[in-house]
Image (cartoon, coloured by chain):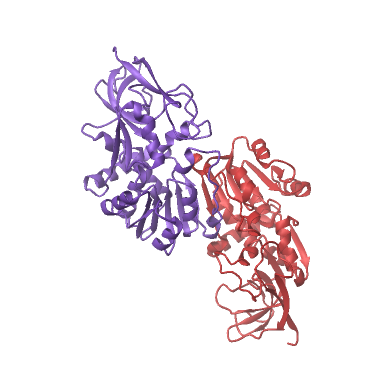
Chain colours: A purple, B red
Amino acid sequence: MTETNRRMILAQRPTGMVDDTIVTMEEAPVPEPGDGEYVVKVSHVSIDPTIRTWMDDAPGYLPPIGIGEVVRSGGLGTVVASRNDEFPVGTTVFGMLGWQDYALVDGTPGTGNVVPDGMDPTAVLSVFGVTGMTAYFGLLDVGEPKEGDVVVVSGAAGATGSVVGQIAKLKGAGKVVGIAGGPEKCRWIVEELGFDEAIDYKAGDVGEALSAACPEGIDVYFDNVGGEILDAVLERISIGARVVLCGAISAYNDRGSAYRLKNSFMLIMRRAKMQGFLILDYLDRFPEAQGEMFGWVLDGKVKHAVHVVEGLERTPEALNLLFTGGNTGKVIVAL
Amino acid sequence: MTETNRRMILAQRPTGMVDDTIVTMEEAPVPEPGDGEYVVKVSHVSIDPTIRTWMDDAPGYLPPIGIGEVVRSGGLGTVVASRNDEFPVGTTVFGMLGWQDYALVDGTPGTGNVVPDGMDPTAVLSVFGVTGMTAYFGLLDVGEPKEGDVVVVSGAAGATGSVVGQIAKLKGAGKVVGIAGGPEKCRWIVEELGFDEAIDYKAGDVGEALSAACPEGIDVYFDNVGGEILDAVLERISIGARVVLCGAISAYNDRGSAYRLKNSFMLIMRRAKMQGFLILDYLDRFPEAQGEMFGWVLDGKVKHAVHVVEGLERTPEALNLLFTGGNTGKVIVAL
């Protein structure tokens, strides 16, 4: 191969949003596979809020991305060179490929997964991928919704939140309320996705809107944002409520002065639980969820939106969209 | 009856500690039982942190105590007049008798429970009562300790915390660390109760002490205090940790400026849960716990201390002890 491999490198630790002083592009030779290894030409990169947390030198569920290393992320592509019989040239593969044109995969279990022919690559990275699995297990396993429950989701027009609300309806929630930013997102989740109500957090006081939408309290809250919205929900949880901590986007760009929670006291008053989870703990249960999700998507019961950004060089910009709320649905960079 | 009934009345809502402007004594006639009712002469009053929360006009698991009403609390006494065949004169009864000499009990299910003859009244109000049940179900049902777990308890020399640590050891915890105030309490929980280590929160940085005592992280935390100590623990929880929110003594006297939690973010990073509970939800399971606890106490495996204050007029002072840390073990007012 005579092409070069463009790699988006973490040059220094960010203190806020990511720009071209934080992530720089460098060129390197396309890697050659060693014994058992293979090389994937990346076609689509998955953009997820958690990538921002990996850029900090702080405790996390994975080690921080090292300075000088390629930014870690999920992605999808085609095997172009292989010394691994399970992943021959031409295979479509999903894995942690990173922000680069070519990824060297070591071939050990879990490092790459074959994608069946004919699958829409954007669906692989969204509803059938980590994003959809996060919605599925976070809501059903941690949130434990019961028939008739009032379910509230923040980041409701995002990749995970939009799926959470639809699954909640399918599983018999009495009322599903989404919190999103701006009238267009609010319209989308109600009219297209079937949420019962939407709260535009940019349009007024979220607490008052929650009181109006959920006069009898909130049974399940799927939290993608943390901060003041989490506090507003905690003030209104019902007895035995489950608060699912999926993410805290509001804090990712500024951990030091992170929002301090006022209403954790309500967990005692309402005998409620607040629980974080990590989708990587559910890897062995993905097939059951993917089976159910596949049926729902095929029947048009779960819809998903994709926000595609073109060009590897725009990966930092694509990441920032998640924090400015510039996206509806899953953000993917197409190479 | 020609005696009068001294009643400790909530005269106004407190903003901090309780004094004689908040709770005043008034005299009233001893009540007469109506049909199905009975009157108990109170001998012992249970002093619990939760009483302070009932004095606030704030959402809680029970309605606030009304201004002009007798302060609500558990207690024990003897039936002195009865129009209820299940509770004849002479019966020893436990129930929500309040801070007063004579309590009128309406006789409906749950309002009073017969205490078997020969039971130590202080044990009824502590290890076999709500305090001990709180320790038992909070630790085992919410905390779900596993063999070998590192268990940390705050308020460890208090009525509930001291029992939590002992049950944790009996159930196979690998290490039990208690957080208490002052060298004498720390000595007591280690030397008398068998905690593995004690941290004196008055003697230095709790976070550093926790890091030293629990280098591999904290699996179960039974929280009686909230505030900065809860934050220090959250910073050090292990993957899959369970944080049991039993109380938040540090906040009860000043809800408005309640401590704001900094490290709830760690629940995501460590896929941990933080859960509040209310012992009243476990009433129907008390017998199973009391059976096991009875055996432990009889065998000397669970020890309990009682801090007795004499005189109804000293109930406010007894309540304040819980917040100044002036007690070791269960605080009871003997009339």
Q: Is residue B58 left or right of residue B101?
A: left
Count of all numbered marks drawn on residues in the image: 0
Q: Is residue B274 left or right of residue A30?
A: right
Between residue B54 and residue A5, name the one nearer to us: A5
Q: Does residue B118 appear in the picture of this structure?
A: no
Q: Is residue A9 left or right of residue A121?
A: right
Picture coordinates of residue B234, whole percent (x, y) = 58, 43
**Residue, far top:** A2
In which quadrant of the rendered image does the N terminus of chain A lie? top left
At x 65%, y 40%, the residue is B207
Between residue A191 and residue A288, name the one nearer to us: A191
Between residue A167 and residue A232, name the one nearer to us: A232
Picture coordinates of residue A260, whole percent (x, y) = 55, 47
At x 29%, y 45%, the residue is A292
Picture coordinates of residue B329, whole percent (x, y) = 72, 57
Residue B148 drawn above or below residue B12: above
Q: Is residue A295 left or right of residue A236?
A: left
Residue A114 drawn above or below residue B245: above
Between residue B171 and residue B231, name the one nearer to us: B231
Image quadrant of residue A50? top left
In which quadrant of the rendered image does the C terminus of chain A lie? top left
Residue B105 drawn above or below residue A30: below
At x 76%, y 71%, the residue is B313
Q: Does residue B280 appear in the picture of this structure?
A: yes
Picture coordinates of residue B295, whole percent (x, y) = 65, 57
